[in-house]
Image: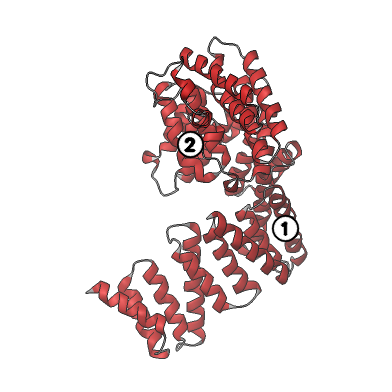
């Protein structure tokens, strides 16, 4: 008698490594957008059997989460069919995750004999591919798990890195794991690192050395090098990537981002429009187009060329709104796009609509713990420039700054608060609230003595303010 026969079916299922056991909760992802991206990826993976096997397997789980178990089963069958067509003696390694999903799905459907059948097949496959330890997974499983985390939602990026690292421990030269690890590092590395310390740059270089025809990796390396002001090498990589794979929407979207950040906005728009023609249901691409039109609008004002060009500004705002509406429709709870859309409604003088959108965005951002700082910044800008409420603007700039100084949003909020306070003091040197704002900014920056000076000035003109008294007490204690 097989000892495993005494183990309850549910326990056997929990011991499997597949999408059903990887803690992928639908509340953490936009399933509709994820479905679209996986379907687009399958089209791109024509001729790449390994990529199609993994994408169909992942898509099956997404369809299950969406409430379509029959579609899930169809996609798992396709994953299995592609595995059978794969050339190589080790092709059954791909079935570890696929069969795990099939066992779980049949269990949910009440087909317990089918479930048991797939569990038995998995025992046979694992005997063919031993890992030497029950706690160590086959590298293909680590790899599939890593790609899944990388695609599911940004909160899983750190887990993706860890799984790629484990896959690379066993297969250090495998191109798929090197590429995925490079992408994961690119997405998680902050912009304050130095070039010589950049793990993303080192890994992307290694991945390109293994896969010299991977244009996506070239563009990502170019974008990363641009941060470190290595413009010549970055430009060369971008041009080479475009020449190599100009029809790949992943390449185009990142190249478009590169050109937008480099000031070549019209070139970026042209590229992104081509990508949208090929993948019209990409919320990311529409968001990138909105950012391009937003930059054109910002550049008009920055160069002082907006005067007398009200019609052009209105057109640019309209383009931003159009693409942001499409992006937020295609990708629900797309917090960055929602916040930007609310701000542009305000710029288009649709104040009630903007207010409603901001409230929806705050709710979604707080529920998902996603980009709350950005929403506070944009709402502060809306209150200051469209609603003409400096009090509410200052409140939300402060909220933004409290969530972190060492971010783009935190620094922008600090600048806006400082500028607002200095303008008020130029009008009224006895404005206690303005001194209080400057005290708050310096306190957030850790400049305690400067903060103390400003809070003391604030109390001279607003001597019963509890906020200033509390801040002063805290500062004096910390400076003792």
* Residue 110 position within the rendered picture, expressed as x and y whole percent measured from the top left: 65, 31
User: Which callout, 2 or 1, points to the residue nearer the camera?
Assistant: 2
Residue nearest the viewer, comparing 228 with 248 = 248
Q: Is residue 429 something that shows in the picture?
A: yes
Between marks 2 and 1, how big is the CA–CA gap?
A: 34 Å
Residue nearest the viewer, comparing 298 with 27 = 27
* Residue 294 position within the rendered picture, expressed as x and y whole percent measured from the top left: 66, 57
Per the image, label 1 sits on a secondary structure element best described as helix
Task: Identify the residue position indicated by label 1 in the image.
Answer: 321
Tell me the residue at 56%/76% (across/down): 392
Task: Indicate the quadrant containing the C terminus: top left, top right, bottom left or bottom right.
Answer: bottom left
Task: Identify the residue position indicated by label 2 in the image.
Answer: 160
**Is residue 299 left or right of 223 when viewed as pictured?**
right
Q: Which one is earlier in the sequence, the residue at label 2 or at label 1?
A: 2
Q: How many marks?
A: 2
Position of 173 relative to 58 (above/below): above
**Is residue 441 left or right of 71 when viewed as pictured?**
left
**Residue at the extreme left:** 480
Q: Is residue 55 something that shows in the picture?
A: no
* Residue 129 position within the rendered picture, expressed as x and y whole percent measured from the top left: 46, 15
Tell me the residue at 52%/25% (across/down): 176
Neighbours of disc 2 within 10 Å: few (<14), some (14-19), many (20+): many
Tag 2 and tag 1, C-beta contact below 8 Å: no
């Amino acid at each position: 008698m097989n000892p495993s026969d005494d183990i309850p079916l549910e326990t056997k299922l929990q011991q499997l490594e597949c999408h059903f056991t990887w803690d992928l909760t639908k509340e953490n992802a936009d399933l509709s957008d994820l479905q679209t991206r996986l379907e687009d990826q399958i089209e791109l993976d024509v001729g790449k059997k390994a990529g199609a096997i993994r994408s169909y397997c992942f898509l099956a789980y997404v369809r299950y989460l969406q409430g379509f178990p029959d579609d899930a089963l169809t996609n798992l069958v396709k994953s299995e069919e592609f595995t059978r067509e794969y050339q190589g003696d080790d092709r059954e390694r791909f079935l570890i995750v696929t069969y795990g999903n099939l066992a779980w799905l049949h269990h949910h459907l009440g087909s317990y004999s089918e479930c048991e059948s797939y569990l038995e097949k998995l025992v046979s496959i694992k005997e063919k591919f031993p890992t030497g330890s029950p706690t160590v997974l086959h590298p293909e499983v680590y790899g599939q798990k890593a790609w899944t985390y990388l695609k599911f939602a940004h909160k899983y990026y750190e887990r993706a890195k860890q799984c790629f690292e484990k896959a690379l421990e066993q297969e250090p030269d495998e191109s798929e794991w090197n590429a995925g690890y490079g992408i994961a590092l690119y997405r998680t590395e902050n912009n304050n690192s130095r070039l010589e310390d950049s793990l993303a740059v080192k890994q992307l270089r290694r991945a390109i050395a293994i896969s010299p025809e991977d244009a996506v990796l070239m563009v990502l390396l170019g974008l990363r090098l641009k941060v470190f002001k290595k413009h010549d090498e970055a430009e060369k990589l971008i041009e080479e990537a475009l020449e190599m794979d100009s029809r790949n929407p992943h390449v185009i979207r990142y190249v478009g981002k590169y050109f937008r950040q480099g000031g070549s906005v019209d070139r970026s728009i042209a590229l992104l429009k081509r990508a949208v023609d090929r993948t019209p249901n990409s919320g990311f691409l529409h968001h990138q187009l909105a950012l391009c039109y937003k930059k054109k609008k910002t550049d008009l004002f920055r160069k002082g060329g907006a005067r007398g060009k009200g019609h052009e500004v209105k057109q640019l705002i309209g383009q931003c709104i159009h693409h942001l509406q499409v992006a937020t429709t295609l990708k629900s709870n797309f917090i960055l796009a929602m916040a930007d859309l609310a701000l542009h409604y305000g710029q288009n003088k649709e104040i009630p609509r903007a207010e409603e959108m901001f409230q929806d965005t705050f709710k979604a951002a707080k529920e998902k713990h996603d980009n709350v700082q950005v929403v506070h910044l944009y709402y502060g800008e809306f209150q200051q420039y469209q609603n003409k409420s400096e009090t509410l603007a200052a409140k939300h700039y402060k909220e933004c700054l409290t969530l972190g100084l060492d971010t783009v949003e935190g620094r922008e909020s600090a600048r806006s608060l400082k500028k607002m306070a200095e303008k008020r003091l130029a009008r009224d040197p006895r404005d206690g609230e303005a001194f209080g704002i400057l005290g708050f900014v310096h306190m957030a920056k850790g400049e305690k003595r400067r903060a103390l000076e400003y809070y003391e000035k604030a109390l001279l003109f607003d001597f019963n303010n509890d906020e200033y008294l509390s801040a002063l007490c805290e500062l004096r204690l910390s400076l003792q």
